[in-house]
């Protein structure tokens, strides 16, 4: 049943966010520490476990797949509710701080990706094809 | 006639989330239309959709004077719910369903390195920029540095160390600029920084840290990479809130005197 997939997803989210809140309280930070990340880890492990035992039939999987494919529209809605005015009004200091952080971080991606990688598989061909 | 319009508005308001589904669907359709016809598919439809979303948010902000973008327009309030943290996180977690466990394990070490480099690097850059613009006290430098991390780390850190509301607002603005740049710029830089595999996506998420930015940017680059980037990015804000008011503040105060 489709609801099994949706329910599994919901269970992962609630558990993850709860653990994230607990972690935040434990280390004394006013923020959720990795709640969504923990939920994603749970989802990955559970999906792996259930698939191997064949306990999640295709119909139940639809309950998760629907939400993962509605993801881009959700991001568009998220973009449409940003406080764009505040970002623009922040003036040159805010613009520069934000922009520089992005540029420097970008430049570091190839460097750090190499750490601990004996052979990085560079999917160059794929990336060329992907440049539609 | 006006009663008919009023009635329609009422229906739209009462069914806010459903209105949002219809509205966002139209926006996405229009974006893919523009992508195919005007750019011959060179700029990905979802990248255009996100840009269009930001543009609409600007219009919403100008017309209503609120801080929720389009969601402040009454008949489009549902957009706020659809794009809010609850459904966003639900959808992000769902993307983890397609993740390969082995890919993640192999990238573990560099994901952790990227988190620390990303958080501390952003603090340094933000603090230097703050200093250059005359905010030369340790509290302001730390707070604006925190904003360069994410727009959540900024106010959390600022509040913890007692920054002025002007500086906190500035830090939020810096974080918003970052988030929007990442959202829109990722597809354009992806090929130059090798952002085409799970490993570099995890590093990217760890370095950038803005969950909304990373998730949006990767969605427009290659939806398969979203869960990997989003996974590390969600740890970034927590790490920033942990390091900002403590280690980073103490170090900056020691240096500035």
Image (cartoon, grey):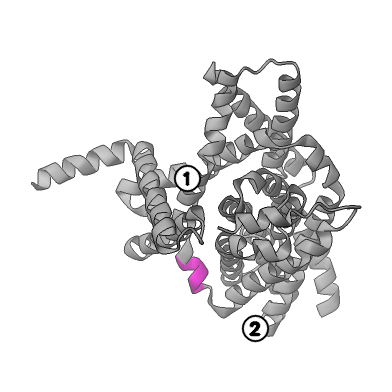
Q: Quadrant of residue B159?
A: bottom right
Q: Using residue B2 as the reference point, say whether residue B84 is left or right of it.
A: right
Q: Quadrant of residue B151?
A: bottom right
Q: Would residue A57 be visible to someone looking at this image?
A: yes
Q: Which element is circle 2 on?
A: loop
Q: Give me the residue at 55% from left, 19% from top.
A: A59
At label 2, counting other C-alpha atoms closer than 10 Å, the crowd grade (few under 14, some 14-19, many 20 or more) is few
**Residue B166 in picture, x, y percent from top left:** 57, 71
A87 in magenta: yes
Q: Nearer the viewer, mark 2 or mark 1?
A: 1
**Quadrant containing the C terminus of chain B in the rendered view:** bottom right
- Magenta stretch bounds: A85-89
At label 1, counting other C-alpha atoms closer than 10 Å, the crowd grade (few under 14, some 14-19, many 20 or more) is many
The residue under label 1 is A73
**Residue B131 in picture, x, y percent from top left:** 71, 81
Chain letter belonging to callout 2: B
The residue under label 2 is B133
Q: Check if mark 2 and mark 1 are on a common chain.
A: no
Q: Would residue B67 be visible to someone looking at this image?
A: no
Q: Which mark is residue B65?
A: none
**Residue B14 in picture, x, y percent from top left:** 30, 36
Chain letter belonging to callout 1: A
């Amino acid at each position: 049943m489709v609801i099994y997939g949706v329910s599994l997803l919901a269970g992962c989210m609630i558990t993850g966010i709860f653990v994230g809140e607990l972690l935040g309280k434990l280390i004394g930070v006013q923020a959720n520490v990795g709640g969504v990340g923990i939920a994603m880890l749970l989802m990955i492990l559970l999906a792996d476990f259930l698939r191997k035992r064949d306990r999640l039939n295709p119909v139940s999987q639809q309950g998760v797949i629907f939400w993962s494919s509605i993801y881009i529209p959700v991001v568009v809605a998220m973009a449409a509710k940003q406080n764009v005015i505040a970002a623009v009004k922040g003036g040159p200091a805010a613009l520069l701080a934000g922009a520089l952080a992005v540029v420097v971080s970008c430049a570091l991606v190839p460097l750090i990706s190499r750490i601990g990688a004996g052979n990085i598989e560079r999917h160059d061909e794929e990336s060329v094809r992907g440049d539609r | 006639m006006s009663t008919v319009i009023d009635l329609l508005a009422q229906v739209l308001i009462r069914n806010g989330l459903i209105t949002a589904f219809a509205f966002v669907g139209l926006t996405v359709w229009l974006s893919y239309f523009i992508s195919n016809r005007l750019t011959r598919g060179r700029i990905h439809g979802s990248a255009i959709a996100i840009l269009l979303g930001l543009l609409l948010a600007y219009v919403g902000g100008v017309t209503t004077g609120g801080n929720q973008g389009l969601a402040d327009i009454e008949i489009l309030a549902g957009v706020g719910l659809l794009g809010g943290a609850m459904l966003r996180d639900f959808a992000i977690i769902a993307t983890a369903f397609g993740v390969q466990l082995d890919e993640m394990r192999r990238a573990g070490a560099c994901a952790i390195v990227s988190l620390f480099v990303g958080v501390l690097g952003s603090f340094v850059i933000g603090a230097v920029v703050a200093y250059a613009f005359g905010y030369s006290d340790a509290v302001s430098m730390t707070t604006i540095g925190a904003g360069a991390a994410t727009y959540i780390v900024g106010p959390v850190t600022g509040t913890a160390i007692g920054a002025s509301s002007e500086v906190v607002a500035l830090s939020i603005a810096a974080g918003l600029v970052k988030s929007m740049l990442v959202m829109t710029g990722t597809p354009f830089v992806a090929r130059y920084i090798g952002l085409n595999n799970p490993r570099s996506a995890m590093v990217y998420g760890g370095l950038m840290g803005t969950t909304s930015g990373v998730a949006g940017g990767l969605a427009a680059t290659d939806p398969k990479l979203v869960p990997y980037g989003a996974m590390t990015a969600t740890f970034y804000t927590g790490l920033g809130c942990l390091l900002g008011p403590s280690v980073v503040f103490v170090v900056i105060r020691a240096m500035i005197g």
